[in-house]
Amino acid sequence: ELFEVLCLVQTRKAKPVPIFLYGSSYWKNVINFEALADEGAIAYEDLNLFRYVDDPQTVWSDIRAFYGLA
């Protein structure tokens, strides 16, 4: 599902949504998105479609900011 939502947002077939990869050390070890960009498999700007996070408060703050919640 991660790649599906990334693809839909990237191709603008879906509205932008906050995409969080919780547990940065895990995700950076499992999928090296920077290497994919270096090899031209994805654009460097695609790295802005998601954010690595390590704590729930950051996720909640970002969701609130994204949707303009008080």
Image: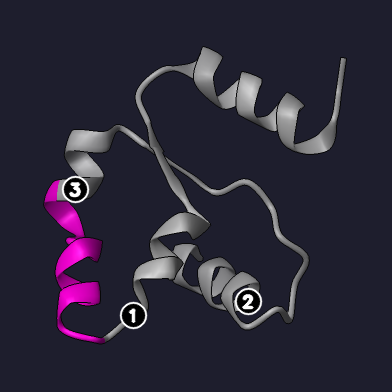
The reply to whether callout 1 and callout 3 are in contact (CB within 8 Å) is no
Distance in Å between CA atoms under marks 2 and 1: 14 Å
Q: Amino acid at mark 3?
A: Lys
The reply to whether callout 2 and callout 1 are in contact (CB within 8 Å) is no
Residue where numbered disc 2 is placed: 8
Residue at 54% in and 77% down: 7
Give the foreground label among 2 and 1.
1
Where disc 2 sits, the SS reads helix
Q: Which residues are magenta?
A: 29-40
Distance in Å between CA atoms under marks 1 and 3: 16 Å
Camera-side residue of 31 and 48: 48
Q: Amino acid at mark 1?
A: Ile
Mark identifier at residue 28: 3
Camera-side residue of 61 and 29: 61
Mark 3 or mark 2: name the one nearer the start of the chain.
Answer: 2
Q: Position of residue 25 (x, y in %)?
A: 17, 35
